[in-house]
Image (tube, rainbow, N blue to C red):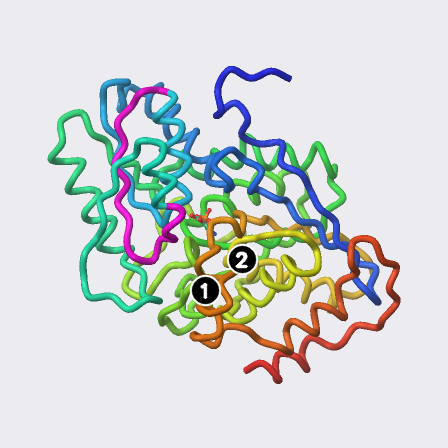
Amino acid sequence: MIYTAMSQMIGNTPILEIKLNGTEWSLLLKIEKFNPGMSMKDRMARQMIFDSLASGKLTRDGVIVESSSGNTATGIAYIASELGIRFIAVVDHHAAKDKIDTIRAYGGEIHMIQGDYSDDEVATVERESTAAALAKKIPGAIFFDQSNNFSNPKGYSTSLAHEILNDLGTDINELVACVGTGGSITGCGRELKKEIPDLKIIGVEPKGSTVFGFPGGPYFQSGTGVPPGDKIGVIYDPALIDEGIIVDDRKAFTTCIYLAREHGLLVGGSAGGAIYEAVKRCTQNPGSGKTLCLVCDGGEKYLSTVFNDEWINEKNLFCEETFSLLQKTLCKPYSASTVKINDFNQELKACT
Ligand SMILES: Cc1ncc(COP(=O)(O)O)c(C=O)c1O
């Protein structure tokens, strides 16, 4: 296949199966870092841009303004560069430095929210109000407002869900995915459920995020969750979610480190949380089945945090017990290990 634009390469990402010891459940990972912007958010970025051009709300000489933790803005930045459209990304200190540098590299402008925030605090509320105000001030500008923009879930229902159905058919029992804006889980989940009515949809948010009613607080997982003080937008459909789970930073980041060291797979911090939960379910579900986990982005975006030993140790974000449990539970790619799995409940106790 020969393409004429980078944005045409969005999608058709691979699925990696990881075998588990002592269970007939299959763990399937949809590896979204193989999109050109190295995250699943390319899908919704393209949809938001094309839909707003089609409706006339955005013109080629207009300006896009968006609040982002970095992945949405990366997707918008390279597609805007293809189209020659000016783009301003409103970000905060919680966004990974590599993401901000990438947006700049594509010619995107960075508007950084200033304020007295701790490392693990997210300034989503300020980001969104600033982006809305900026767009009002600049002639021809549009604020995409991804949390309330129906092109966000549409970006997944029109591409991601159909790829999954093409690759796996209807033989999937569970979908595990992070929830930030809720666009990916809603768009993909709703479309999959049309073909697989019994599909269980499991939402994962960081411990400290408030979507599923758990107590709010700071967290380091980037791009996901809804911090205290903010609220999830109208595009998220809670009726689709069968279970909402929280995973803390230690388990999420230790899963990332484990997958990098033992499976040659670099995943982002939020994906680490979703994969941790997917593994847990595979080991606890009775009988046999398939759990598909959406792996939102790649660890290449978090080399100075999740994959920096100094940063991890300073913040005490590595959990030895989680690492060794994963070692015992997941089969290495080229081995036929028969070690019996531990009970995740034991590990949960050891880790908290
Ligand atoms: C790394 C990462 N994880 C999870 C999410 C949450 O995805 P969604 O907004 O579709 O709920 C995002 C969204 O930006 C993200 O960038």
Residue where numbered disc 1 is placed: 212
Residue drawn at 82 percent across, 65 percent down? 21
Dot 2 or dot 1, earlier in sequence: 2
Q: Amino acid at mark 2?
A: Gly
Residue drawn at 73 percent across, 77 percent down? 343
Residue where numbered disc 2 is placed: 203
**Which part of the image, by quadrant, shows the C terminus?**
bottom right
Quadrant of res 32: top right
Dot 2 lies on which element? Answer: strand
Q: Nearer the viewer, residue 300 or 328?
A: 300
Disc 2/disc 1 C-alpha distance (Å)? 9 Å
| Above or below 291: residue 146 | above
| Magenta span includes 240 | no
The location of residue 157, given as percent across then percent down, is 54, 35
Quadrant of res 213: bottom left
Q: Nearer the viewer, residue 268 or 134?
A: 268
The location of residue 122, given as percent across then percent down, is 31, 61
Is residue 87 something that shows in the picture? yes
Dot 1 lies on which element? Answer: loop
> Which labelled disc corresponds to residue 103?
none
Query: Relative to 332, is 297 on the left or the right?
Result: left
Please give the range of residues in magenta: 83-99
The location of residue 48, given as percent across then percent down, is 38, 31
Q: Amino acid at mark 1?
A: Phe
Asked whether mark 2 and ligand 1 are closer than 8 Å, the reply comes as no
Q: Are marks 2 and 1 in contact (CB under 8 Å)?
A: yes
Residue drawn at 62 percent across, 43 percent down? 193
The location of residue 245, given as percent across then percent down, is 54, 65
Residue drawn at 20 percent across, 49 percent down? 129
